[in-house]
């Protein structure tokens, strides 16, 4: 009976995952690799369905630190029109063709184009938006009160923000204003971000170029994951569907034990 119940539970979890509405979110981001940044930065997106059409969407990076008049400006506006996620739901934007370790999965859609300018290592807010009508250099925080005054987009699909290890580390919390995660680290600035299950992690990385890169156990938030390493263009370890099944099965066994 227990075996039948578990089989039903697993099938139900898979069905829920398969029938989830289409969505796009940040999956892994490398902003500050060891040594020089150029050629090793990447942004990885994940969709809840395969081959998700990203037409009409943009990746935005908003300046999050610096003097008044700089915070809130659009540093990057990267168009996603003409691209879809791969059959595995992954899209990888690379700044060069240097193959990282581990290499991306064959099913992943890969876009190679340098980030101009390079992605800053200081505080930023990263967004995936639809209906973008703004421009690079536009100041969205005109009165410099650390709140956005202009919203040149129709909707925000996903995003997050983080601070630099500066005295004003809690400034420019645009992500909080938009109801998105914010990482207020005051003693270190994250090198990378990754989504594991439903949680987004910020951390410094250890490793040699071109990888693999692991979490720094002393600089990770909200927790250090000893078995985690960045997998640009491949499933995160463990991948979200596995975490869902593990959690559901574990909860059921505890309740029926």
Image: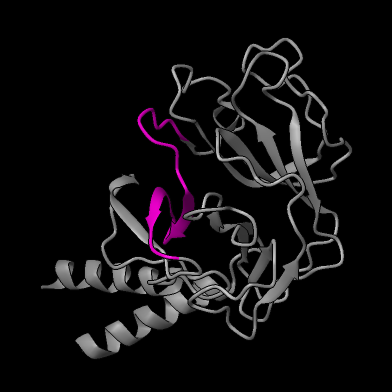
Q: Quadrant of the N terminus?
A: bottom left
The residue that appears at 60% across and 57% down in the rendered structure is 41
Q: Residue furthest left?
A: 257
The residue that appears at 29% across and 59% down in the rendered structure is 225
Which residues fall within the magenta stretch? Answer: 183-208
Quick check: is 193 in the magenta stretch? yes
Relative depth, front residue between 159 and 60: 60
Q: Left or right of 223: which side holds 168?
A: right
The image shows residue 112, relative to residue 123, as above or below, that is: below
- Which image quadrant is residue 123 in? top right
- Tell me residue 71's x, y (percent): 67, 22
- Tell me residue 172's x, y (percent): 58, 23
Relative depth, front residue between 186 and 25: 186
Q: Quadrant of the C terminus?
A: bottom left
Quick check: is 127 in the magenta stretch? no
Q: Left or right of 245: which side holds 66?
A: right
Relative depth, front residue between 68 and 208: 208
The image shows residue 79, relative to residue 17, as above or below, that is: above
The residue that appears at 23% across and 66% down in the rendered structure is 251
Q: Left or right of 178: which side holds 130?
A: right
The residue that appears at 40% across and 55% down in the rendered structure is 205
The image shows residue 208, relative to residue 86, as above or below, that is: above
Relative depth, front residue between 222 and 5: 222
- Tell me residue 25's x, y (percent): 61, 56
């Amino acid at each position: 009976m227990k075996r039948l119940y578990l089989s039903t539970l697993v099938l139900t979890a898979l069905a829920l995952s398969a029938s989830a509405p289409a969505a796009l979110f940040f999956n892994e981001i490398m902003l500050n690799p060891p040594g020089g940044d150029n050629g090793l930065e990447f942004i990885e997106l994940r969709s809840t369905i395969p081959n998700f059409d990203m037409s009409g969407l943009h990746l935005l990076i908003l300046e999050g630190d610096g003097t008044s008049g700089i915070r809130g400006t659009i540093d990057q506006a990267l168009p996603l029109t003409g691209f879809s996620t791969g059959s595995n739901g992954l899209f990888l934007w690379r700044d060069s063709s240097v193959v990282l370790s581990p290499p991306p999965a064959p099913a992943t859609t890969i876009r190679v184009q340098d980030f101009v300018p390079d992605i800053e290592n200081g505080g930023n807010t990263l967004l995936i938006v639809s209906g973008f009508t703004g421009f690079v250099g536009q100041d969205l925080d005109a009165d410099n009160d650390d709140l956005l005054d202009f919203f040149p987009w129709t909707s925000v699909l996903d995003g997050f923000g983080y601070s630099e290890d500066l005295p004003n580390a809690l400034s420019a919390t645009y992500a909080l204003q938009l109801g998105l995660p914010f990482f207020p680290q005051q003693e270190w600035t994250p090198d990378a971000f990754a989504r594991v299950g439903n949680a987004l992690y910020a951390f410094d990385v250890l490793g040699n170029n071109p990888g693999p890169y692991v979490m720094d156990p002393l600089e990770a938030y909200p927790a250090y994951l000893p078995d985690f390493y960045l997998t640009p263009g491949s499933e995160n370890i463990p991948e979200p569907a596995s975490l869902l099944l593990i959690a559901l099965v574990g909860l059921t066994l505890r309740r029926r034990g």
